[in-house]
Amino acid sequence: MMAWYGGLLLGLLLAFSVVVDFGANRVLMISTADRINGVAQQIEAVTRSERNEPFGVVSVRTLLSDESTLNTFAGAGLFVEVFTPGKQLYPIGRSGNLGGFDLPTTGYVDWRAPAGFGDDWGSAKTDVGPVLAHWITIAGPQGPEVIVYVAESLTLVQRTITAFGVFLLISVLIAAIAVIATGAWLARTAVAPINEIARAAREIGGEDLAKRLNWQERRDELGVLASTFDEMLGRLEAAFARERRFIADASHELKTPLTVINGNAQMLQRWADRDPALRAEAMETIRSESASMARVINAMLTLAKTDDAEALALEPVSLAAVLHEAGGALRPAAERKGLTLEVRCDTDATVRGEPGLLRQLITNLTENAVKFTQSGRVTLTLERVGDLARITVSDTGPGIPEEALPHVFERFYRADPARSRNVEGTGLGLAVVRNIVRVHGGEIRAESSSEGGAAFVVELPTI
């Protein structure tokens, strides 16, 4: 890439040099043409003043055939020659610096003069070297009297252009050396660290995420990139650790019901026809374990679904309606345990979300509260706090130990494994809740309620 940019820069320098060289050539030629045009105008002015004298046509020819007169208009590298008009031009006078040579009257190469200079211009190679020439016709009462050629040598112009071209070429070569040196320096100071980051990225695999660049001493953009890279590795390492733990826990959770189902299926195969009670018990065990497996799988599918917020179909949802619907559906289960389930919605709040997931959010929290509360009540509360809708699901159960609060949303985490094993559940309910809250742009926290039990507080942005 650095070589490509260097080549592009050199190409631009060469193109710029060509344009500058062409422009300098054009400026010098126009400057030469200005001098020639000025001399031609002086000659015309002199002949007009002489025409007022009583000499007639012969006086102009005589005037311009005089070498001393023409020498007053000529100069270093500037030549003047006068011809008689007609089909065949005959020289009648020339400036002394032409020596014995004549300016050609034919064979001129067209010179594209700028606007205002006219068409009587051309360049040619002559006995006195390359020249730029301009010819004018001086007319009198009887018609054209003489044709005057004014020419200036282009030798100095060509030398100047050549010297300027050499200067541009040397400048481009120096610029090329500077570009190459700068490119090499940039490759060492800028590209090399990037290559080091790329090399580190290639060395990192799923089994070795502990590698870090540790470029804390750098404060430039590459230091920021390296720091961001290290932070990304930290997040990846944590994510891989969570996934490994999730796979191990899921395998453990599914292995037990599969083993139970397989054992009961074998027992049915051997003894089902002999003992109807045994057959009924085995079928019930299979049904219960398969239902448990279904709950685990459904929870895992919900976790996968809520990992991608862009895949959700969001719409305006009334949270008051969701709370009343979930509370009404779970109230019979709470009453069977002798619990009171209250829904307190003094206000309503509308959020942008997926109705099914929001119902599952409230249902999971409420089921969890009913499951772990032995007496008292479960309360669902909705209130507005600024631009947020705050949902609180609290209970009068035993609460959550202080040390377990930071971990309750982890997958398959159990605050008291010995006690929780006797409570029906997948260990994924609160993890699903956290994912649902996250994809809706909200936050959730667990804390102790004012009544001694547990309280889960969900805050979602309203619309």
Image (cartoon, grey):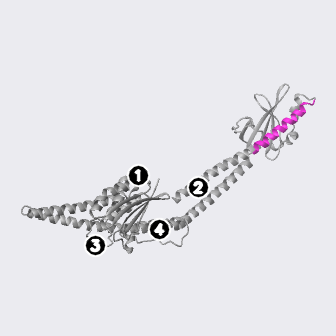
**Between discs 3 and 1, the one toward the N terminus:** 1
Q: Which residue is mark 1?
A: 317
- Vertical order, 28 against 303 (above or below): above
Q: Nearer the viewer, residue 307 or 122?
A: 307
**Residue drawn at (55%, 64%), measured in percent from left and top?**
186
Was residue 368 drawn as part of the magenta stretch in this picture?
no
Region rendered in magenta: 31-53
Q: Nearer the viewer, mark 3 or mark 4?
A: 3
Amino acid type, callout 4? Glu
Q: Are marks 3 and 4 in contact (CB under 8 Å)?
A: no
Q: Secondary structure at mark 2?
A: helix
Mark 3 to mark 2: distance in Å? 77 Å
Q: Secondary structure at mark 3?
A: helix
Q: Secondary structure at mark 4?
A: helix
- Vertical order, 157 against 188 (above or below): above
How crowded pointer 1 is (Cα within 10 Å; few <14, some 14-19, many 20+) is rated as: some
Q: Which residue is mark 3?
A: 419
Q: Are marks 3 and 1 in contact (CB under 8 Å)?
A: no
Name the magenta segment's main secondary structure: helix
**Residue drawn at (31%, 56%), measured in percent from left and top?**
329
**Between discs 1 and 4, the one toward the N terminus:** 4
How crowded pointer 2 is (Cα within 10 Å; few <14, some 14-19, many 20+) is rated as: some
Q: Which residue is mark 4?
A: 196
**Between discs 3 and 4, the one toward the N terminus:** 4
Q: Nearer the viewer, mark 3 or mark 2?
A: 3
Q: Is residue 100 left or right of residue 255?
A: right
Q: Which residue is mark 2?
A: 10
